[in-house]
Image (tube, rainbow, N blue to C red):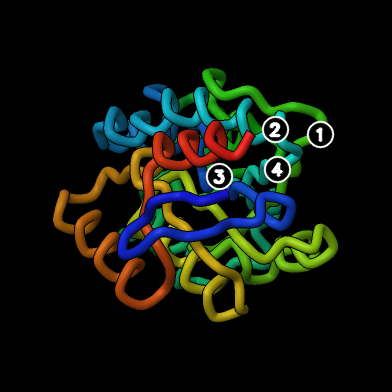
């Protein structure tokens, strides 16, 4: 399949491609999740929902694996070092990872909880793949690389939030591991300032892979049928 990207047009083998959807989960994207509870406007984080709703069925129809990579910690937090815990409770008093930001609410970023679940607007099918992560990068201390190697995948499409944080960290590790990486910019978003997103796009196309949008990908799929 030919697809227009920045900085150049690519030929992509969809039989060896997977979509990685990063952190499109309630704690980051729901108005009732952890980010919203600490006063962050999560509307920007919800922007990928509609492009993904259009793209994912098209990829599934071609048997492209859909990998949902969500932050989902152990309930006992035993594998989390102090520097990770600090990010979510800088003063040591705010409800952090594994704690409930609201009375009766879901524990923050805990695997198996509402907090770690994909937002309702995106459908997870039984044939999709779920991987829990515990750091900004989804490759650190997880099964992600092993799963992708077993699928004989060499090209990764990246979507999700935050594009300048967990998406970018996972993408850079993927590039270092030898995967070909395409960032789908309309399927990504961030609650950070706009210059963070701009810098991420620049760095991806300059050093780590390619930048495209889902419409270019859909056009390539239709042209290849």
Mark 4 neighbour density, 10 Å: few (under 14) some (14–19) many (20 or more): some
Q: What residue would you read off at disc 3?
A: 21
Q: Is mark 1 on a helix, strand or loop?
A: loop
Labelled pair 4, 2 in contact (Cβ < 8 Å): yes
Give how far apart the Cα atoms at labels 1 and 3 are: 15 Å
Return the disc, 4 or 1, that comes first in the chain's sequence: 4
Whether residue 165 is situated above or below residue 98 in the rendered picture: below
Between disc 1 and disc 2, whose residue precedes?
Answer: 2
Side of 199 where 178 appears, left or right:
right
Give the Cα separation between the discs numbered 3 and 2.
13 Å
Query: Which numbered disc covers residue 60?
Result: 2
Q: Name the residue under label 1.
A: 127
Residue drawn at x 44%, y 27% is 49
Q: Which mark is residue 64?
A: 4
Whether residues under marks 1 and 2 lie with C-beta atoms below 8 angstroms apart, the answer is yes
Is 41 situated left or right of 37 in this image? left
Helix, strand or loop status at disc 4: loop
Left or right relative to 42: residue 152:
right
Q: Position of residue 92 (x, y in %)?
A: 38, 58
């Amino acid at each position: 399949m030919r697809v227009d990207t920045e900085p150049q047009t690519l030929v992509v083998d969809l039989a060896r491609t997977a979509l990685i959807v990063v952190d499109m989960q309630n704690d980051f994207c729901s108005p009732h999740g952890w980010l919203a509870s600490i006063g962050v406007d999560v509307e920007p984080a919800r922007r990928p929902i509609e492009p993904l709703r259009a793209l994912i069925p098209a990829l599934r129809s071609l048997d492209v694996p859909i990998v949902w990579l969500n932050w989902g910690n152990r309930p006992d937090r035993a594998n989390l070092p102090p520097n990770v815990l600090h990010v979510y409770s800088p003063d040591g008093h705010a409800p952090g990872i594994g704690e409930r930001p609201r009375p009766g609410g879901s524990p923050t970023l805990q695997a198996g909880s509402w907090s770690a679940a994909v937002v309702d607007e995106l459908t997870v099918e039984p044939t999709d793949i779920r991987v829990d992560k515990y750091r900004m990068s989804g490759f650190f201390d997880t099964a992600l690389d092993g799963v992708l190697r077993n699928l004989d995948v060499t090209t990764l499409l990246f979507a999700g939030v935050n594009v300048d944080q967990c998406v970018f960290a996972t993408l850079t590790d993927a590039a270092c591991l030898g995967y070909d990486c395409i960032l789908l910019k309309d399927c990504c978003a961030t609650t950070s300032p706009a210059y963070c997103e701009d810098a991420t796009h620049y760095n991806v196309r300059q050093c780590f892979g390619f930048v495209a949008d889902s419409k270019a990908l859909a056009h390539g799929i239709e042209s290849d049928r």
